Image (spheres, rainbow, N blue to C red):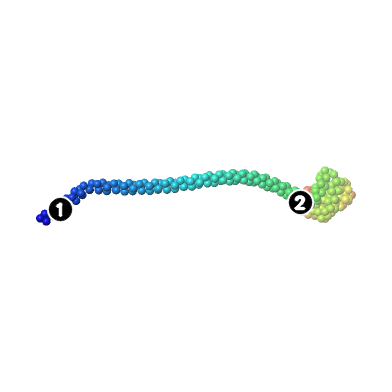
Amino acid sequence: MIRRAIRPWWHAAASGVLLAAAAWSPAQAALFDDEEARKAILDLRARVTAQEEATKARLNELTVANTQLQEQVQSLRRSLLDLNGQIEVLRAELARQRGNDEQIARDVAELQRRQRDVVQGLDDRLRKVEPQKVSVDGVEFLADPDEKRAFDEAMNAMRGGDFDRALGGFQALMRRWPGTGYAPAALYWSGNAYYGRKEYKEAVSAFRSFLSAAPQNPKAPEAMLGLANSLAETKDVRGARKVLEDLQKTYPASEAASAAKQRLSTLR
């Protein structure tokens, strides 16, 4: 009786529990679904918030980078402007330098021209005072410019038949330059000038002085012929014939020797 009484109670209790469970499960399940949904929504919101924060941070980074880039662009523009300014300054400096170089080139050219003029002037002055190498009758020697000029002037007078001027020139030359290399030529032409002036004794003296001073001179044969003619004019026929004979013996191949032979045939 007791079992029967208990069993129905347990059974009834179990049945009640089952009924309560059956009645409670759908609601509980609904509660569980809402919780998961809330969790999913919260998780989604957290993700969206995180994404937004990341996006904002990225935007901030991009903004900062853009600002820095703009600053760099501005700095680059300023640098380019400064560089253009420097280029213009350099161009102006280069143009000025080119102008200076051209002026320098002109100055150098002017200095070179002046230097040439100075050198030329110096050479001209030196030529007026420095001894010059000259050659007379195959003999070379040094002569002062004034010395050469004096001889040339006397010779020009001689060629022009101005015996007085020529003789004065030769005598002045030998007085001023006693050891002149022109002495033999001056003596020879002085003899001819005296002969032209019909001063035969003086001519004899000049020709003898020449032959004594320069026996090897190319004009020695002509000087002997002049000496013989001068002696003949002084009536010293014997002396003239002697000189003509010596001329033929000493310089047999000269033109003066041929002239001496003809002169001997007429000299009495």
Residue 198 picture location, percent across and down = 88, 46
Which residue is pictured at 10% across the width and 55% down the height? Answer: 1
Nearest the viewer among 176 and 161 is 176
- How many neighbours does mark 2 have within 10 angstroms: few (below 14), some (14-19), or many (20 or more)? few
Classed neighbour count for the residue bearing mark 1: other residues with Cα under 10 Å, few (<14), some (14–19), many (≥20)? few
For the residues labelled 2 and 1, say whether their Cβ atoms are less than 8 Å apart: no
Q: Residue at x 75, y 48 (%)?
A: 121
The extreme bottom residue here reads 2
Q: Secondary structure at mark 2?
A: helix
**Separation (CA) of disc 2 from disc 1:** 164 Å
Q: Is residue 107 visible?
A: yes
- Secondary structure of residue under mark 1: helix
The answer to whether residue 226 shows anywhere in this view is: no
Q: Identify residue type, mark 2.
A: Leu
In the rendered image, residue 67, in percent from the top left (x then y), is placed at 48, 46
Find the residue positioned furthest to the right.
Answer: 235
Residue 45 locus on image (x, y percent): 35, 47
Name the residue at 75% across, 50% down: 122
216 versus 84 height, above or below: below
Residue for badge 2: 126
Is 167 left, or right, of 63 in this rendering? right
Q: Is 65 displayed left or right of 222 in the figure? A: left
Mark 1: amino acid: Trp
Between 58 and 232, the residue placed more toward the observer is: 58
Q: Nearer the viewer, residue 36 or 154?
A: 36
Query: Camera-side residue: 7 or 165?
Result: 7
Residue named by callout 1: 9
Residue 154 in the image: state x and y as whole percent: 82, 47
